Structure formats: C-alpha cells, structure tokens
Image: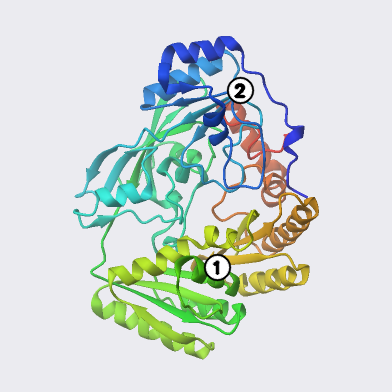
Amino acid sequence: MNAPTIAQALSRPTPPACLEALATRFGAAFSTALAVRQQHGRDESPFDAPPPAGVVFCASTQDVADAVKLCAAHDVPVIAYGAGSSLEGQLLAIHGGISLDLTRMNRVLRVAAEDLTATVQAGVTRLQLNDELRHTGLFFSIDPGADATLGGMTATRASGTNAVRYGTMRENVLALTVVLADGRVIRTGTHARKSSAGYDLTRLFVGSEGTLGIVTEITVRLYPQPEAVAAAVCSFPDVASSVDCTIQIIQAGIPIARCELMDANAVRAVNAHDHLDLPAQPLLLMEFHGSPASVREQAESVQTIAAEHGGSRFSWADTPEERTRLWKARHHAYLSALQTKPGCRSVTTDTCVPISRLAESINDTVAEADAAGLPYFIVGHVGDGNFHVGYLIDPAKPEERELAESLNDKLVRRALALGGTCTGEHGIGLHKQGFLREEAGDDALDVMRAIKQALDPRGILNPGKIFAPSE
C-alpha cells in the first residue's frame, strides 16, 4: 500500500519564541485560533492530520519572505496554503509548523494583451483572472475544475479540461517569483515566449508542491478568445465505446478543445445535483474552438466518429448559458458524487497513460471497481489520456479505506505498466510517494533528493511531501 500512516509522522514542536516573533511581525494577520488552524489543516484528501501551530495571512512577497525567515530561524516547517482543494494531502501539516495563507495575495499585477501574458499574485484564482480578462478578448486556458489559486495550480502542475488543446501549467507558465527556504527572493524566466539562458528554474518549481520554494507571483500565457465556440454532449452504451471514440478523435488529428468523460455513476450524481436530465449512461462532453466554419467541420467529424461507436443523443449547446450549465455540472461531479453517499469521503486518484492504451486502462479499472462493490465514479480529461477515479468510503469503516487503496494500487500499477504516470495532475503529496519511486527509479529519485537538499537543507518547506519518510 502507498497510503501513509499520518500518526507515524514526526511532528516538530513550534517554539513559543517563533510564535511570539510571528505575532510581533504580523499582528492580526497571524492566528493561533483552533478554528483557523483546523481550516488550514484539511484539504480534499481522505487523510486526517493535526492542524498547523499557526496561520500567517500573507499579503505580499515580502510577507512570505519574512515569515519564512522567522520560521527558518527556529527550524519550523512552513506550508503554503491556497484554496485548500488539493487531493493528495499536499497542505497537511504532518510535521507541524506554520501555514502561510496566500489568498490575500489576490491582485492581477499586469495584463500585457499585446504579448498575450498576465502576471498575477499567487492567491489569484482562475475564475478571478478570467473575469479580469473578459474585456480584453483573451482568456487563461487552464481549468482544473475547482476554482483553484494559480499558486496552487503552479505547485501541482495542474491541467484540466482544456489541456488537450492548450497544454498544462508546465507549458503555460513563463516566469515566477519564488521565496526560498532561507527567505531569499528569486525571479525565474522572463516575459519572452522562450529562452535558452541557463537552467530552466521555472520548470523546476512548477510541480514541486511547495517543497523547493513558495511561489508568490506567476506570469502565464494567455490566448485569444475563439471566434466561435460550441459544446456537444453524446451518450454511449458503455465506457469502452466512449473511450474508443475519444482515441479515434485524437488519432484523426481533430483539434478538439475539450473532451471529457463522465461514467454513468457521475452522470447520475450530476443529474441529481444540478437538476439535469442527461441519460444515465457514460457520456462525452466536448467543446470546439475556432472559426464558425472550422467549428462546424470539427463537430461534424466528431459526430460521425461518435455514431460509429454507438454514440447517441448527440446534442449541441450553442449559447454561452447552455455551455456554462453543462460545464458547471462537469465541474460539480466531485461534490455531486459525495452527496450520493452522505457522510462519505473520497479516495480520489488519477493516472495518465498514452492515448493508445487508454481504453485498456479504463476498462480494467471499471471491471475491478464493479467487482469490488465499492461505490465509485469516473471522470476524465480523456482527450489527453488522463482520468480520475473517486472511491467513496465511510471514514468509520477502515475496511472500506483498505479496499479503496487496494483498487488504487492496481490502477496505478497498471498505468505504469502501460507506459503512463502515477498522477497526471494531482501531484504526489502523501498518497503516491511509493509509486514515484517505481515510476522514476532510484537514480532519478536521488537527483530529486539532491535538489531538495540543495534548496532546503533544513527541510522546512512542506516536509513529508513527495518523498517517503525514509527518503
């Protein structure tokens, strides 16, 4: 099993002197109230852990740097906090320490429409940024579902529904401002579209989950709003047919912007939550961007392919209101599924495989989950081979957690065997540390640990994440 036992983590005590120093520097922006600490000691993972010893509400890069310096002076861990929507335990204070809440760092610092870039503070959310851009004719493309902060999206190398056409955070981050473990502030990258100057430090921090530095400002790529947008939904007799359809769409080179799968369980959940009447079958929710002629051509080609795979009730959402309603339901799939089993928690996992192996991966996953009898749902950014499974468990029944982890173990090992990865966008956090070793190998892990040691020799930046305790 790759799931950690939180009780085994070695918590570092936070000296009163550190708390006093933080209170002196930050005043009312520092809190040790239990309710505040508990809020910052919980994410969307199924793990329970003690809350941090305190929370600093940072409003600037200087605030972050000062907080890190004070904590470093007392060997106290620091954990960056954004929207709290991480799924693999990334923000849990398993070694104790101080949570740095970056949500007050919510300013859009610069929009360079002529360069198709924007620079934002780490606490800006994706919806906030796109609202700021609504009059520019541009948009920010990364859409992981939750209204996550761009700092958190950078830390986990998020992607989401648009990744099949526009790429992930890795491809869309140009420059960063980062606070290092000793409080130094560095800037990586530039506003230029490319560079070959030295090591690519920007990519080093993208996906590092707050273990190498704390990202405080991000410069991202923007894209012109397409001239025409159309969304379509199509139901299929089974998951296999929908996946085979997706594979043929991608292999045909059709530049589809979004291609999302919801299995029958997810469809039933969103029908109940959002008062929809979608057929209780697996479906693909798709979106097409371009000129009116190209959108029509893409859609007609996809409709033909879908029919070849048993697709039915192919319907359009042409108006912004109709499209928003459909995509809102897709984004609600996780919360909708939780409501189907009151009091449950979700052991949520994701993998990504080469598109040619996607059908095999999902079909075997469905067969195992059905045989186990544990409630589950599947959603996926299947256009790029990435899908998510949520196993719904009763937190009072350890045997259900054990069964879910057993299913996750099979799912991830299958993805690795098929040439894929243990996580397409959730990150490693606590949940997939053992799988990282299997995927990357000992020598690559040695390099990662050497980087961590070089940038954080005292181990105060989000300790216990990515690497297993023995590492």
The amino acid pointed to by label 1 is Ala
> Where is residue 418, by image quadrant?
bottom right
**Left or right position of 346 against 277:** right
**Residue drawn at point x = 77 percent, y = 72 percent:** 371
For the point 64% across and 34% down, the residue is 449
Q: Residue furthest right?
A: 399
In-image side of 19 versus 375 (left or right): left
Pointer 1 local density, CA inside 10 Å: few below 14, some 14–19, many at least 20: many
Q: Is residue 436 left or right of residue 65?
A: right
* Circle nearer the N terminus (1, 2): 1
The image quadrant that residue 291 belongs to is bottom left
Q: Is residue 348 above or below residue 251?
A: above
**Residue 358 spot, x, y in % from top left:** 60, 71
Quarter of the image where the C terminus is located: top right
State the residue in front, 350 or 213.
Answer: 350
Q: Is residue 378 visible?
A: yes
Q: Are marks 1 and 2 in contact (CB under 8 Å)?
A: no
| Residue at the spot 60% in from the left edge and 81% down from the top edge | 238
Which labelled disc corresponds to residue 181?
none
Percent x, y of residue 444: 66, 43
| CA separation in Å, label 1 and label 2 | 47 Å
Label 2: element kind: loop
Give 137 or 374, whichever is nearer the viewer.
374
Q: Which mark is residue 457?
A: 2
The amino acid pointed to by label 2 is: Pro
Q: Secondary structure at mark 1?
A: helix
The residue singled out by tag 1 in the image is 269
